[in-house]
Amino acid sequence: MLKMPNIILIGYRGTGKTTIAKNLGEKLGLLIINIDEEIKKQIGSINESVKKHGWKEFRETESRIIQNLDIKDAIIDCGGGVVESEKNIENLRKIGKIVLLKADSNTIIKRLEGSHERPSISGNKPFTEEVEEVLERRIPLYKKAADFEIDTDNKTIEEVSGEILKLIKENE
C-alpha cells in the first residue's frame, strides 16, 4: 500500500466523486469513505430527511461526521455541499489533500438526468436553473477549499484517477 495523505474529493453533484473514489480505492487498496453514506446510516433516506427536517439538519449531521473523522489511508468522497461550512473544510484539511473535481454545467446536467436520488437544493426551481445557480454560488467555495483542481469533462475514470495520483505524488 502506498503511503500518502487521505485523498478528499469535493465538487458538485455529477462531477464524478463517487466513481473516482471507488476507482482510486480499488487501485490503491485504500478504504473509501462516502460521507453521504455515513449520513444515511444516521438519518436514513437523505431525500426523506431533507423533506421532513430541511437542509439544516442534514448539514449539521454532515459536519458532525466530518469533525469526527479520524482515519488514515482513505479516499473520502464528500457531498457537493460540504463547502457550505468553512468548519468542514478546516477539519478536512487536517486529515488530507482536497481535490476538486469539476465539470461544466452541461456535462453535470447530462450526468444527472434521470437521477431521483438527490433532493432538490433550492426546492422550487427547474433542475437546469438550479444547477446553474448553485454552481455559481459554490464555485468560489470549491476553489478556496481545494488543494488541487481537476476537470472531469470528456475524461475517462482512469485519466482522472491518474491525474489525481500524479498531483498528490508531485506535491507530497
Image (tube, helix red, strand yellow):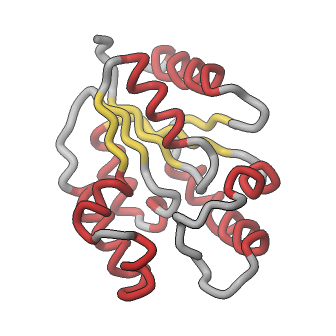
Q: Is residue 102 above or below residue 165?
A: below
What residue appears at the point 73 percent right and 72 percent down from the top-left corner? Answer: 127
Residue 59 in picture, x, y percent from top left: 37, 72
Q: Is residue 68 above or below residue 132?
A: above
Locate residue 40: give its quadrant: bottom left
Locate residue 167: give its quadrant: top right
Quadrant location of the C terminus?
Answer: top left
Residue 73 in picture, x, y percent from top left: 27, 26
168 sits to left or right of 141? left
What residue appears at the point 54 percent right and 66 percent down from the top-left corner? Answer: 118
Locate residue 62: give its quadrant: bottom left
What residue appears at the point 41 percent right and 63 percent down from the top-left corner? Answer: 86
Q: Is residue 126 above or below residue 86?
A: below
Residue 156 in picture, x, y percent from top left: 68, 26
Quadrant location of the N terminus?
Answer: top left
Residue closer to the observer: 141 or 104: 104
Residue closer to the observer: 17 or 170: 17
73 sits to left or right of 107? left
Residue closer to the observer: 99 or 159: 159
Residue 130 in picture, x, y percent from top left: 71, 73
3 sits to left or right of 15? left
143 sits to left or right of 63? right
Residue, far right: 106
